[in-house]
């Protein structure tokens, strides 16, 4: 069961709390997907130009590296309300203590794990009882699977070309994995870990991305029924009410 999906550096939402509440009523392994992509860049902007530069970055970004994102982005006027500046302040303190270390390494090894631990505490969950998957790790896996030179190895390229959905997994301009590819990497990992069904309790804003990835997985299973990676079943519930900030 996936519930409580969140982005590093953003405030907790009522939808996330309710998804966790509902997940705990169900049987199965509880898991959470964490969006840790781009946080190092946001920290640089915060370091250089403060809140204003981070807010400007939010306004200019294109989610998943595409001009037609599946995930619903917040309205620009709403951006200041969703950012948790305390996370940025604490991250800067950590960076200042680790001035001799590479920023990306500090973010990946120290700041992100700390943020995840604190969020799980706010969800009133024990870290050992939750499986955590980060989008950075999944994007890296997807990137390796989408390399042309790996066609004869573990590549997805010939499979996705066969079903005509390669453009649903990576950007046609940059070649970087987008939502479909990142979630496909998650499905592959879950299948290899022995799971056969995913229950997704998520915000309505993530519906289109989830459904697109499910469509890719189902198409792969239909065309390659003997491949165990794509035999997952899906069940979803989405939360669409107006969220309230939880401090």
Image (spheres, rainbow, N blue to C red):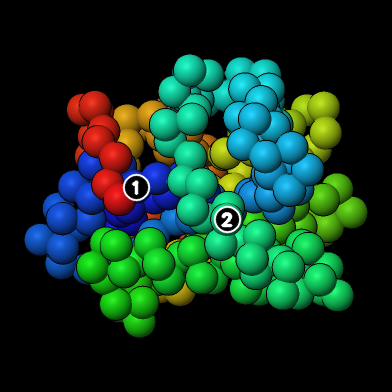
Query: Callout 1: 10 Å neighbours few (<14), some, many (20+)?
Result: many
Distance, label 1 to label 2, CA atoms, is 17 Å
Dot 1 lies on which element? loop
Q: Can you tell which mark lies on residue 181?
A: none
Describe residue 10's horizontal placement relative to residue 65 as left or right.
left
- The outermost residue toward the right is 149
The nearer-to-camera label among 1 and 2 is 2
Describe residue 108's horizontal placement relative to residue 88 as left or right.
right
Describe residue 14's horizontal placement relative to residue 99 as left or right.
left
For the point 24% across and 27% down, the residue is 242
Quick one: 87 or 225, which is closer to the camera?
87
Where's the N terminus, which quadrant?
Answer: bottom left
Residue 48 point in image, percent of width and height: 78, 43
Q: Is residue 170 visible?
A: no
- The reply to whether callout 1 and callout 2 are in contact (CB within 8 Å) is no
The residue that disc 1 covers is: 12
Dot 2 lies on which element? helix
Residue 232 point in image, percent of width and height: 38, 54
Count the marks: how many? 2
Quick one: 223 or 176, which is closer to the camera?
176
Residue 179 point in image, percent of width and height: 57, 39
For the point 69% across and 32% down, the residue is 53
The residue that disc 2 covers is: 89
């Amino acid at each position: 069961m996936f519930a409580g999906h969140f982005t590093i550096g953003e405030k907790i939402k009522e939808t996330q709390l309710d998804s966790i509440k509902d997940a705990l009523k169900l049987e199965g392994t509880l898991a959470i997907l964490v969006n840790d992509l781009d946080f190092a860049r946001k920290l640089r902007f915060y370091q250089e130009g403060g809140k204003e530069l981070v807010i400007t970055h939010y306004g200019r970004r294109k989610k998943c590296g595409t001009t037609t994102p599946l995930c619903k982005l917040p309205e620009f006027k709403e951006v200041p309300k969703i950012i948790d500046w305390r996370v940025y302040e604490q991250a800067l303190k950590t960076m200042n203590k680790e001035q001799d270390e590479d920023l990306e390494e500090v973010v990946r090894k120290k700041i992100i794990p700390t943020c995840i631990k604190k969020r799980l505490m706010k969800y009133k969950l024990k870290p050992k009882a939750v499986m955590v998957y980060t989008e950075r790790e999944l994007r890296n896996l997807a990137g390796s699977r989408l390399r042309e030179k790996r066609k004869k190895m573990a590549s997805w390229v010939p499979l996705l070309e066969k079903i005509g959905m390669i453009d649903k997994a990576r950007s046609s301009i940059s070649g970087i994995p987008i939502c479909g590819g990142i979630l496909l990497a998650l499905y592959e990992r879950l299948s290899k870990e022995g799971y056969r069904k995913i229950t997704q309790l998520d915000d309505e804003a993530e519906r289109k991305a989830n459904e697109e990835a499910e469509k890719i997985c189902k198409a792969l299973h239909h065309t390659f029924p003997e491949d165990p990676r794509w035999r997952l079943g899906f069940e979803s519930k989405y939360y669409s009410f107006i969220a309230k900030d939880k401090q």
